[in-house]
Image (spheres, helix red, strand yellow):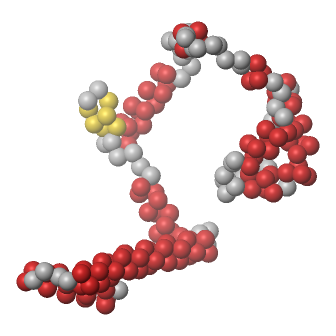
Amino acid sequence: MQNCKFIIAFFHLQEEYRALSAGERFLRCACTDRLQMAIRERAAYWKQRGKFRAIREANANTAFHHAHATNRFRRNQIKTVTVNGCELTVHNAKAEALTTYFSSILGTTTIAFWQFNLTDIYSGTPTPDLSDLAAPITESEARAAVQHMNRNSAPGPDGFGPGFFSAAWDTVSPKVMKFVETFAQGTVDVE
C-alpha cells in the first residue's frame, strides 16, 4: 500500500510540472486500482476478524462483551420526541408523550375504504381469469416458493430455516403439504 501511495503521489507531483506520458498515466491508474483493492481487502479482513471475536466472546463476561453491549445501548435510544412542535428530551416527558399517543390509537377502529373499482382498473382489456388464485396450492408451487426463499434466513420457531427445507424437501414435503392444506382450510393449529 505504501508503494502505491508513493507512486500515485509522485505522478501527481510530476503532473503539476509536465504532462504525463501514456505509460505513466496507466501506471498511476493501475496503482490507484491496486490501492483501492488493498483497502477493500483490509476492510474485509478486519470485518471478518471482528465478527470472529464477537462470536467467540459474545456471551462471555468479558470487557469486550460489556463494551459491545454499552455501544449498542448508546445507539439504541430515542434522543428527542417532537410533540406539537415542542421537542422533549427528558425521559419522563418522552415516556408520557409516547404513552399518551399509543393509548389514544390503541383499541380504536377505523373503516377501510376501497378507493378503486376492479372493473375500472381493467377497462379496455378483458377481465383476467382469477379462478387460479382460489385453486389449491400444489406441491410444485410450494417447492418453488421454498426454493426462492433466502437459504440463509433466520430459522423459524422450530429451529429450521429455509435452507433446511430446501435441502430436505423430499423428506419434509408430506408434512409441509399437510400444513398448507390445513392452512388453506382454516383449521391449522399454529400453537
Q: Nearer the viewer, residue 164 or 30?
A: 30
* Left or right of 175 in this view: 108: left
The quadrant of the image that shows the C terminus is top right
Residue 158 rendering spot, x and y as whole percentages? 79, 50
Above or below: residue 63 compared with residue 177: below
Is 113 rendered above or below residue 168? Answer: above
Q: In the rendered view of the protein, which quadrant contains the N terminus?
A: bottom left
**Residue at point 47% right, 69% down?**
67
In the orientation shown, which residue stands out farthest toward the front? 22
Q: Quadrant of residue 24?
A: bottom left
Q: Nearer the viewer, residue 68 or 122?
A: 122
Q: Nearer the viewer, residue 90 or 191?
A: 191
* Residue 47 locus on image (x, y percent): 49, 72
Vertical arrangement, residue 159 with respect to residue 141, above or below:
below
x, y percentage for residue 189? 84, 32
Determine if residue 160 is in view.
Answer: no
137 to 36, vertically: above or below: above
Residue beneath the point at 33% across and 42% down:
80
Q: Residue, x 41% and y 49% (percent of image)? A: 77
Please give the name of the residue rendered at 71% of the width and 17% of the height, measured from the top-left corner.
129
* Total marks placed: 0
Front residue of this view, candidates 104 and 1: 1
Place of residue 94 in the rendered image (x, y in percent of width and height, measured from the top left): 38, 37
> Residue 60 lies in what quarter of the image?
bottom right
Q: Is residue 95 left or right of residue 109?
A: left
Is residue 88 visible from the viewing direction of this image? Answer: yes
Q: Is residue 8 left or right of residue 103?
A: left
- In the displayed image of the protein, which residue is found farthest to the left? 17
Which quadrant of the view contains residue 133? top right
